[in-house]
Image (tube, coloured by chain):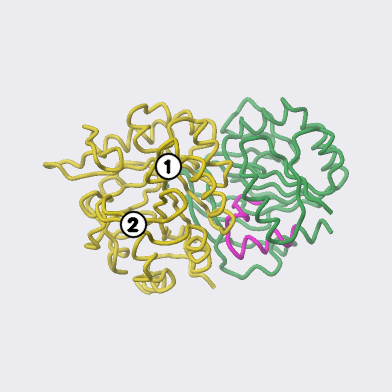
Protein backbone atom coordinates (compact mmCIF):
# COMPACT_ATOMS: atom_id res chain seq x y z
CA UNK A 1 0.00 0.00 0.00
CA UNK A 2 1.41 3.35 -1.01
CA UNK A 3 0.06 6.80 -0.54
CA UNK A 4 -0.97 8.02 -3.99
CA UNK A 5 0.59 11.17 -5.42
CA UNK A 6 -2.11 13.79 -5.77
CA UNK A 7 -3.18 15.84 -8.79
CA UNK A 8 -4.82 19.10 -7.75
CA UNK A 9 -6.53 21.54 -10.11
CA UNK A 10 -6.55 25.11 -8.85
CA UNK A 11 -9.33 27.65 -9.34
CA UNK A 12 -8.10 31.23 -9.12
CA UNK A 13 -11.31 32.99 -8.25
CA UNK A 14 -12.10 36.66 -8.74
CA UNK A 15 -15.50 37.16 -7.15
CA UNK A 16 -17.77 34.56 -8.71
CA UNK A 17 -15.60 33.64 -11.73
CA UNK A 18 -12.45 31.63 -12.35
CA UNK A 19 -9.70 33.71 -13.94
CA UNK A 20 -6.22 33.02 -15.19
CA UNK A 21 -3.10 34.99 -15.92
CA UNK A 22 0.61 34.74 -16.58
CA UNK A 23 3.01 35.51 -13.73
CA UNK A 24 0.06 36.69 -11.63
CA UNK A 25 -0.92 39.47 -14.08
CA UNK A 26 -3.04 39.88 -17.23
CA UNK A 27 -6.10 38.06 -15.91
CA UNK A 28 -8.84 36.69 -18.13
CA UNK A 29 -12.04 34.73 -17.55
CA UNK A 30 -11.74 30.92 -17.43
CA UNK A 31 -15.21 29.80 -16.44
CA UNK A 32 -17.71 29.09 -13.70
CA UNK A 33 -16.12 27.68 -10.52
CA UNK A 34 -18.92 25.22 -9.71
CA UNK A 35 -18.99 23.85 -13.26
CA UNK A 36 -15.23 23.36 -13.31
CA UNK A 37 -15.37 21.77 -9.84
CA UNK A 38 -17.99 19.25 -10.98
CA UNK A 39 -15.89 18.37 -14.01
CA UNK A 40 -12.68 17.85 -12.02
CA UNK A 41 -14.52 15.84 -9.39
CA UNK A 42 -15.71 13.38 -12.03
CA UNK A 43 -12.44 13.32 -13.99
CA UNK A 44 -10.48 12.00 -11.03
CA UNK A 45 -8.93 15.07 -9.42
CA UNK A 46 -7.67 14.16 -5.93
CA UNK A 47 -8.41 17.53 -4.39
CA UNK A 48 -9.36 21.02 -5.46
CA UNK A 49 -7.88 24.36 -4.44
CA UNK A 50 -9.85 27.61 -4.72
CA UNK A 51 -7.96 30.86 -4.19
CA UNK A 52 -9.53 34.29 -3.84
CA UNK A 53 -7.12 36.33 -5.89
CA UNK A 54 -8.82 39.64 -5.11
CA UNK A 55 -8.62 38.82 -1.41
CA UNK A 56 -10.16 42.09 -0.35
CA UNK A 57 -12.68 42.53 2.45
CA UNK A 58 -15.33 43.70 -0.04
CA UNK A 59 -15.14 40.47 -2.01
CA UNK A 60 -15.42 38.20 1.03
CA UNK A 61 -19.15 37.40 0.89
CA UNK A 62 -18.90 36.63 -2.85
CA UNK A 63 -15.95 34.30 -2.29
CA UNK A 64 -17.70 32.48 0.56
CA UNK A 65 -20.74 32.00 -1.67
CA UNK A 66 -18.42 30.61 -4.36
CA UNK A 67 -16.90 28.15 -1.84
CA UNK A 68 -20.38 26.95 -0.94
CA UNK A 69 -21.25 26.42 -4.62
CA UNK A 70 -17.95 24.64 -5.30
CA UNK A 71 -18.15 22.42 -2.20
CA UNK A 72 -21.63 21.31 -3.19
CA UNK A 73 -20.15 19.72 -6.33
CA UNK A 74 -17.31 17.85 -4.64
CA UNK A 75 -16.81 14.41 -3.14
CA UNK A 76 -13.10 15.19 -2.76
CA UNK A 77 -11.31 17.61 -0.41
CA UNK A 78 -11.46 21.34 -0.98
CA UNK A 79 -8.76 23.78 0.09
CA UNK A 80 -9.62 27.48 0.04
CA UNK A 81 -7.65 30.61 0.75
CA UNK A 82 -6.61 34.05 -0.28
CA UNK A 83 -6.96 36.90 2.16
CA UNK A 84 -7.29 34.83 5.35
CA UNK A 85 -6.06 37.14 8.12
CA UNK A 86 -7.54 35.67 11.29
CA UNK A 87 -8.89 32.49 12.86
CA UNK A 88 -12.34 33.99 12.29
CA UNK A 89 -11.66 34.29 8.53
CA UNK A 90 -10.46 30.67 8.56
CA UNK A 91 -13.56 29.55 10.42
CA UNK A 92 -15.92 31.14 7.90
CA UNK A 93 -14.08 29.53 4.98
CA UNK A 94 -14.18 26.11 6.66
CA UNK A 95 -17.83 26.48 7.62
CA UNK A 96 -18.62 27.40 4.00
CA UNK A 97 -17.43 23.92 3.06
CA UNK A 98 -13.65 23.97 2.69
CA UNK A 99 -11.66 21.20 4.40
CA UNK A 100 -8.42 23.14 4.58
CA UNK A 101 -7.32 26.74 4.41
CA UNK A 102 -4.25 28.27 2.83
CA UNK A 103 -2.35 31.02 4.60
CA UNK A 104 0.10 33.24 2.80
CA UNK A 105 0.73 37.00 3.23
CA UNK A 106 -0.98 37.31 6.61
CA UNK A 107 1.09 34.45 8.04
CA UNK A 108 4.30 36.14 6.91
CA UNK A 109 3.19 39.33 8.66
CA UNK A 110 2.06 37.47 11.77
CA UNK A 111 3.35 33.86 12.00
CA UNK A 112 1.21 33.18 15.11
CA UNK A 113 -1.75 32.94 12.73
CA UNK A 114 -0.40 29.50 11.77
CA UNK A 115 -0.36 28.20 15.36
CA UNK A 116 -3.75 29.73 16.16
CA UNK A 117 -5.49 28.08 13.20
CA UNK A 118 -3.57 24.81 13.64
CA UNK A 119 -4.63 24.55 17.27
CA UNK A 120 -8.25 25.28 16.51
CA UNK A 121 -8.74 23.26 13.32
CA UNK A 122 -5.85 20.77 13.37
CA UNK A 123 -2.59 20.79 11.39
CA UNK A 124 -4.27 18.80 8.58
CA UNK A 125 -6.47 21.85 7.87
CA UNK A 126 -3.66 24.39 7.60
CA UNK A 127 -1.74 24.71 4.34
CA UNK A 128 1.00 27.31 4.21
CA UNK A 129 1.32 28.77 0.69
CA UNK A 130 4.72 30.12 -0.26
CA UNK A 131 5.30 32.12 -3.44
CA UNK A 132 9.03 31.75 -4.02
CA UNK A 133 11.32 33.59 -6.41
CA UNK A 134 14.94 32.85 -7.18
CA UNK A 135 17.11 35.79 -6.14
CA UNK A 136 20.85 35.21 -6.28
CA UNK A 137 21.54 31.79 -4.80
CA UNK A 138 18.39 31.70 -2.67
CA UNK A 139 14.65 31.28 -3.09
CA UNK A 140 12.97 34.25 -1.47
CA UNK A 141 9.39 34.57 -0.24
CA UNK A 142 7.12 36.96 -2.15
CA UNK A 143 3.84 38.28 -0.75
CA UNK A 144 0.72 40.19 -1.89
CA UNK A 145 0.06 37.95 -4.86
CA UNK A 146 3.75 37.68 -5.63
CA UNK A 147 4.24 41.43 -6.03
CA UNK A 148 6.32 42.26 -2.97
CA UNK A 149 9.46 40.67 -1.53
CA UNK A 150 9.12 39.58 2.10
CA UNK A 151 12.88 39.44 2.71
CA UNK A 152 12.64 35.89 3.95
CA UNK A 153 14.31 32.71 2.76
CA UNK A 154 11.65 30.32 1.44
CA UNK A 155 13.18 27.15 2.91
CA UNK A 156 13.68 28.71 6.34
CA UNK A 157 10.11 30.01 6.25
CA UNK A 158 8.75 26.56 5.33
CA UNK A 159 10.56 25.03 8.32
CA UNK A 160 9.34 27.73 10.67
CA UNK A 161 5.75 27.33 9.46
CA UNK A 162 5.84 23.58 10.04
CA UNK A 163 7.21 24.12 13.55
CA UNK A 164 4.25 26.47 14.15
CA UNK A 165 1.75 23.84 13.03
CA UNK A 166 1.30 24.00 9.24
CA UNK A 167 0.25 20.55 8.00
CA UNK A 168 1.20 21.05 4.35
CA UNK A 169 3.27 23.41 2.24
CA UNK A 170 2.04 24.65 -1.13
CA UNK A 171 5.06 26.06 -2.93
CA UNK A 172 4.62 28.11 -6.09
CA UNK A 173 7.59 29.02 -8.22
CA UNK A 174 7.11 32.63 -9.28
CA UNK A 175 9.80 32.08 -11.90
CA UNK A 176 7.88 29.25 -13.54
CA UNK A 177 4.26 30.24 -12.90
CA UNK A 178 2.42 30.61 -16.20
CA UNK A 179 5.47 29.71 -18.31
CA UNK A 180 4.45 26.08 -19.02
CA UNK A 181 8.15 25.17 -18.94
CA UNK A 182 7.82 22.66 -16.11
CA UNK A 183 7.85 22.76 -12.31
CA UNK A 184 10.89 24.09 -10.48
CA UNK A 185 11.96 20.65 -9.24
CA UNK A 186 15.03 22.03 -7.47
CA UNK A 187 12.87 24.37 -5.38
CA UNK A 188 10.29 21.67 -4.61
CA UNK A 189 12.95 19.12 -3.67
CA UNK A 190 14.70 21.63 -1.42
CA UNK A 191 11.48 22.41 0.47
CA UNK A 192 10.35 18.77 0.58
CA UNK A 193 13.70 17.65 2.03
CA UNK A 194 13.62 20.42 4.63
CA UNK A 195 10.18 19.71 6.13
CA UNK A 196 8.35 16.74 7.65
CA UNK A 197 4.95 17.50 6.08
CA UNK A 198 3.58 16.89 2.55
CA UNK A 199 4.56 19.38 -0.15
CA UNK A 200 2.37 20.50 -3.06
CA UNK A 201 4.28 21.78 -6.08
CA UNK A 202 2.87 24.58 -8.19
CA UNK A 203 3.85 26.76 -11.12
CA UNK A 204 4.93 25.93 -14.66
CA UNK A 205 3.17 22.65 -15.45
CA UNK A 206 2.13 21.72 -18.96
CA UNK A 207 3.28 18.25 -20.03
CA UNK A 208 2.69 14.91 -18.27
CA UNK A 209 6.48 14.58 -18.05
CA UNK A 210 6.58 17.76 -15.95
CA UNK A 211 4.37 16.05 -13.37
CA UNK A 212 6.47 12.86 -13.45
CA UNK A 213 9.58 14.99 -12.86
CA UNK A 214 8.15 16.85 -9.89
CA UNK A 215 7.06 13.58 -8.23
CA UNK A 216 10.49 11.97 -8.75
CA UNK A 217 13.29 14.57 -8.90
CA UNK A 218 11.11 17.19 -7.15
CA UNK A 219 10.11 14.89 -4.24
CA UNK A 220 6.61 16.40 -4.32
CA UNK A 221 3.65 14.70 -2.65
CA UNK A 222 1.11 16.51 -4.81
CA UNK A 223 1.15 18.73 -7.89
CA UNK A 224 -1.11 21.64 -8.65
CA UNK A 225 -1.98 23.29 -11.95
CA UNK A 226 -4.69 25.58 -13.26
CA UNK A 227 -4.97 26.69 -16.86
CA UNK A 228 -3.83 23.44 -18.50
CA UNK A 229 -6.79 21.72 -16.87
CA UNK A 230 -9.28 24.56 -17.46
CA UNK A 231 -8.42 24.73 -21.16
CA UNK A 232 -8.43 20.96 -21.64
CA UNK A 233 -4.78 21.09 -22.69
CA UNK A 234 -4.31 18.19 -20.28
CA UNK A 235 -7.00 15.76 -19.11
CA UNK A 236 -6.59 14.57 -15.54
CA UNK A 237 -7.44 11.01 -16.54
CA UNK A 238 -4.77 10.85 -19.26
CA UNK A 239 -2.25 12.47 -16.95
CA UNK A 240 -2.85 9.86 -14.25
CA UNK A 241 -2.58 7.00 -16.74
CA UNK A 242 0.73 8.41 -17.91
CA UNK A 243 2.03 8.68 -14.34
CA UNK A 244 0.84 5.17 -13.48
CA UNK A 245 2.61 3.79 -16.57
CA UNK A 246 5.77 5.49 -15.30
CA UNK A 247 5.56 3.72 -11.95
CA UNK A 248 4.20 6.67 -9.95
CA UNK A 249 1.38 5.63 -7.61
CA UNK A 250 -1.82 7.50 -8.44
CA UNK A 251 -5.50 6.94 -7.76
CA UNK A 252 -6.97 5.90 -11.10
CA UNK A 253 -10.64 6.77 -11.25
CA UNK A 254 -12.93 3.94 -12.28
CA UNK B 1 -35.07 7.76 9.58
CA UNK B 2 -33.07 10.91 10.23
CA UNK B 3 -29.31 10.87 10.79
CA UNK B 4 -28.12 13.00 13.70
CA UNK B 5 -24.74 14.66 13.17
CA UNK B 6 -22.89 15.60 16.32
CA UNK B 7 -21.90 19.18 15.62
CA UNK B 8 -19.37 20.09 18.29
CA UNK B 9 -18.19 23.12 16.36
CA UNK B 10 -14.85 22.01 14.97
CA UNK B 11 -15.92 19.17 12.72
CA UNK B 12 -16.33 18.58 9.02
CA UNK B 13 -20.07 18.72 9.48
CA UNK B 14 -21.03 20.52 6.24
CA UNK B 15 -19.16 18.00 4.07
CA UNK B 16 -20.76 15.02 5.79
CA UNK B 17 -24.14 16.69 5.55
CA UNK B 18 -23.75 17.19 1.82
CA UNK B 19 -22.51 13.63 1.26
CA UNK B 20 -25.56 12.25 3.09
CA UNK B 21 -27.84 14.57 1.11
CA UNK B 22 -26.41 13.25 -2.15
CA UNK B 23 -27.44 9.76 -1.00
CA UNK B 24 -30.95 10.98 -0.26
CA UNK B 25 -30.61 10.80 3.53
CA UNK B 26 -32.08 13.37 5.85
CA UNK B 27 -29.80 14.71 8.55
CA UNK B 28 -29.89 17.19 11.39
CA UNK B 29 -27.14 18.79 13.46
CA UNK B 30 -27.22 18.14 17.19
CA UNK B 31 -25.55 19.98 20.00
CA UNK B 32 -27.82 19.14 22.95
CA UNK B 33 -28.10 16.03 25.15
CA UNK B 34 -31.82 15.82 24.25
CA UNK B 35 -31.11 15.58 20.51
CA UNK B 36 -28.70 12.71 21.14
CA UNK B 37 -31.10 10.95 23.47
CA UNK B 38 -33.75 11.02 20.73
CA UNK B 39 -31.48 10.12 17.80
CA UNK B 40 -32.27 7.16 15.53
CA UNK B 41 -28.75 7.09 14.13
CA UNK B 42 -25.62 9.05 15.01
CA UNK B 43 -22.62 10.25 13.07
CA UNK B 44 -19.61 11.76 14.82
CA UNK B 45 -17.68 13.54 12.08
CA UNK B 46 -14.33 14.64 13.31
CA UNK B 47 -11.36 16.58 12.16
CA UNK B 48 -8.91 18.45 14.29
CA UNK B 49 -7.67 17.82 17.79
CA UNK B 50 -8.72 15.04 20.19
CA UNK B 51 -8.77 17.55 23.03
CA UNK B 52 -11.20 19.88 21.20
CA UNK B 53 -13.57 16.99 20.60
CA UNK B 54 -13.53 15.44 24.08
CA UNK B 55 -13.74 18.83 25.82
CA UNK B 56 -16.68 19.82 23.62
CA UNK B 57 -18.50 16.57 24.41
CA UNK B 58 -17.96 17.07 28.15
CA UNK B 59 -18.67 20.80 28.26
CA UNK B 60 -21.95 20.29 26.42
CA UNK B 61 -22.91 17.30 28.55
CA UNK B 62 -22.96 14.98 25.54
CA UNK B 63 -20.80 12.14 26.85
CA UNK B 64 -23.46 10.40 28.95
CA UNK B 65 -26.30 10.57 26.39
CA UNK B 66 -23.90 9.42 23.68
CA UNK B 67 -22.76 6.39 25.71
CA UNK B 68 -26.36 5.68 26.58
CA UNK B 69 -27.43 5.78 22.91
CA UNK B 70 -24.56 3.48 21.89
CA UNK B 71 -25.50 1.09 24.69
CA UNK B 72 -29.08 0.99 23.41
CA UNK B 73 -27.89 -0.12 19.98
CA UNK B 74 -28.37 3.13 18.06
CA UNK B 75 -26.34 2.84 14.81
CA UNK B 76 -23.20 4.97 15.09
CA UNK B 77 -20.56 6.01 12.58
CA UNK B 78 -17.38 7.66 13.82
CA UNK B 79 -15.26 9.42 11.22
CA UNK B 80 -11.52 10.09 11.73
CA UNK B 81 -11.42 11.72 15.17
CA UNK B 82 -14.81 10.07 15.70
CA UNK B 83 -12.96 6.73 15.57
CA UNK B 84 -10.31 7.94 18.03
CA UNK B 85 -13.02 9.02 20.47
CA UNK B 86 -14.08 5.38 20.96
CA UNK B 87 -10.78 4.43 22.63
CA UNK B 88 -9.57 4.75 26.21
CA UNK B 89 -7.45 7.78 25.39
CA UNK B 90 -5.22 9.39 22.77
CA UNK B 91 -1.60 10.45 22.97
CA UNK B 92 -2.75 13.64 21.24
CA UNK B 93 -4.22 14.74 24.61
CA UNK B 94 -3.04 12.14 27.12
CA UNK B 95 -4.88 13.56 30.12
CA UNK B 96 -8.36 13.29 28.62
CA UNK B 97 -10.48 10.15 28.72
CA UNK B 98 -12.00 8.87 25.50
CA UNK B 99 -15.40 7.21 25.40
CA UNK B 100 -13.65 3.99 26.50
CA UNK B 101 -15.75 1.66 24.39
CA UNK B 102 -12.67 0.06 22.87
CA UNK B 103 -9.51 -1.04 24.62
CA UNK B 104 -6.21 0.51 23.71
CA UNK B 105 -5.10 4.02 23.01
CA UNK B 106 -4.65 6.15 19.96
CA UNK B 107 -1.02 6.91 19.14
CA UNK B 108 0.98 8.97 16.69
CA UNK B 109 2.06 7.44 13.41
CA UNK B 110 5.87 7.16 13.34
CA UNK B 111 7.92 10.22 12.43
CA UNK B 112 9.80 8.14 9.84
CA UNK B 113 7.08 9.20 7.37
CA UNK B 114 5.74 12.64 6.46
CA UNK B 115 2.91 13.62 8.78
CA UNK B 116 0.00 14.22 8.61
CA UNK B 117 -0.85 11.11 6.60
CA UNK B 118 -2.56 13.20 3.96
CA UNK B 119 -4.09 11.90 0.79
CA UNK B 120 -5.46 8.80 -0.89
CA UNK B 121 -4.50 5.34 0.33
CA UNK B 122 -5.76 1.78 0.03
CA UNK B 123 -7.03 -0.71 2.59
CA UNK B 124 -6.02 -4.21 3.56
CA UNK B 125 -9.33 -5.91 4.26
CA UNK B 126 -9.15 -8.41 7.13
CA UNK B 127 -12.68 -9.72 7.23
CA UNK B 128 -16.15 -9.41 5.78
CA UNK B 129 -18.07 -6.41 6.96
CA UNK B 130 -21.22 -4.44 6.43
CA UNK B 131 -19.41 -1.11 5.84
CA UNK B 132 -17.22 -2.34 2.98
CA UNK B 133 -19.87 -4.37 1.17
CA UNK B 134 -19.79 -3.53 -2.52
CA UNK B 135 -16.59 -1.51 -2.26
CA UNK B 136 -14.25 -2.38 -5.09
CA UNK B 137 -11.03 -4.16 -4.11
CA UNK B 138 -8.11 -1.75 -4.25
CA UNK B 139 -10.31 1.33 -3.87
CA UNK B 140 -8.61 4.46 -2.56
CA UNK B 141 -9.89 6.48 0.41
CA UNK B 142 -8.94 9.97 1.57
CA UNK B 143 -7.03 10.19 4.86
CA UNK B 144 -5.96 13.31 6.78
CA UNK B 145 -4.56 12.46 10.23
CA UNK B 146 -1.44 12.12 12.35
CA UNK B 147 -2.79 9.91 15.13
CA UNK B 148 -4.20 6.44 14.61
CA UNK B 149 -5.35 3.23 16.31
CA UNK B 150 -2.21 1.21 15.77
CA UNK B 151 -2.98 -1.85 17.92
CA UNK B 152 -4.96 -4.58 16.21
CA UNK B 153 -8.23 -5.51 17.88
CA UNK B 154 -11.07 -7.99 17.27
CA UNK B 155 -13.22 -5.19 15.87
CA UNK B 156 -10.79 -4.53 13.01
CA UNK B 157 -12.35 -4.82 9.56
CA UNK B 158 -9.56 -3.27 7.50
CA UNK B 159 -6.19 -1.71 8.09
CA UNK B 160 -4.14 0.79 6.16
CA UNK B 161 -0.38 1.11 6.17
CA UNK B 162 1.57 4.35 6.43
CA UNK B 163 4.71 4.13 8.53
CA UNK B 164 2.77 1.58 10.59
CA UNK B 165 -0.32 -0.58 10.12
CA UNK B 166 -3.36 1.05 11.68
CA UNK B 167 -7.09 0.46 11.86
CA UNK B 168 -8.92 2.02 8.93
CA UNK B 169 -12.35 0.43 9.44
CA UNK B 170 -13.87 -1.18 12.51
CA UNK B 171 -17.25 -2.59 13.44
CA UNK B 172 -18.54 -3.69 16.81
CA UNK B 173 -22.26 -4.43 16.74
CA UNK B 174 -23.97 -1.06 16.20
CA UNK B 175 -20.69 0.86 16.40
CA UNK B 176 -18.88 1.55 13.12
CA UNK B 177 -15.89 3.78 12.59
CA UNK B 178 -13.51 4.72 9.80
CA UNK B 179 -10.18 6.53 9.92
CA UNK B 180 -10.58 7.94 6.40
CA UNK B 181 -13.11 10.55 5.31
CA UNK B 182 -15.90 8.76 3.41
CA UNK B 183 -17.50 12.16 2.69
CA UNK B 184 -14.35 13.11 0.75
CA UNK B 185 -13.52 9.74 -0.81
CA UNK B 186 -15.43 9.89 -4.08
CA UNK B 187 -17.53 6.90 -5.15
CA UNK B 188 -15.87 4.45 -2.73
CA UNK B 189 -16.62 6.74 0.21
CA UNK B 190 -20.21 7.17 -0.93
CA UNK B 191 -20.60 3.36 -0.93
CA UNK B 192 -19.40 3.20 2.70
CA UNK B 193 -21.93 5.87 3.70
CA UNK B 194 -24.64 4.08 1.73
CA UNK B 195 -23.81 0.88 3.64
CA UNK B 196 -24.07 2.74 6.93
CA UNK B 197 -27.46 4.16 5.92
CA UNK B 198 -28.49 0.58 5.16
CA UNK B 199 -27.72 -0.35 8.76
CA UNK B 200 -29.88 2.51 9.99
CA UNK B 201 -32.93 1.58 7.93
Name the quarter where the C terminus of chain A is drawn: bottom right
Going from N to C along the chain, the mark reached first, 1 or 2, is: 2
| Chain in green on the image | B
Please tell me whether residue B175 belongs to the stretch shown in magenta. Answer: no
Residue lying at the far front of the rendered structure: A58
Q: Residue A102 carries which label?
A: 1
Q: Residue A160 in the image: x percent, y percent?
A: 33, 32
Mark 2 surroundings within 10 Å by alpha-carbon count, few (fewer than 14), some (14 through 19), many (20 or more) = many
Q: Which residue position holds label 2?
A: A20
Residue at 53 percent across and 46 percent down: it is A99
Report which quarter residue B193 is drawn in: bottom right
Residue at 65 percent across and 53 percent down: it is B18
Q: Residue A96 in the image: x percent, y percent?
A: 57, 44
Report which quarter residue B169 is drawn in: bottom right
Disc 1: host chain = A
Q: Give the range drawn in magenta.
A: B178-196
Q: Colour of chain A?
A: yellow
Q: Main secondary structure of the magenta part?
A: helix
Q: Is residue B137 left or right of residue A147?
A: right
Amino acid sequence: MTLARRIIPCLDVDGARVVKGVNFVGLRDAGDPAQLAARYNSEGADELVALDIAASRDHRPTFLATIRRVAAELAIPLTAGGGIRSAQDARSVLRAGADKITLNTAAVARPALISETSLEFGAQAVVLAIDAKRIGDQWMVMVRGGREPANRDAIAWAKEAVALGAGEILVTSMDRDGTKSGFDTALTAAISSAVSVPVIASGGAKLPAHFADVFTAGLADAALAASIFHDDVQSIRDLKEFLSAHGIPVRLPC
Amino acid sequence: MKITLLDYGAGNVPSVERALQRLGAESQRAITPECIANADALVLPGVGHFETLMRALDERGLRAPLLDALGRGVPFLGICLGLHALYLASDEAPDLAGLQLLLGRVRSLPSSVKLPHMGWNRLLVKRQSRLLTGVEAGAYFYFAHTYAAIDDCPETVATCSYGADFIAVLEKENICAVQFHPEKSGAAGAQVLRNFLGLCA
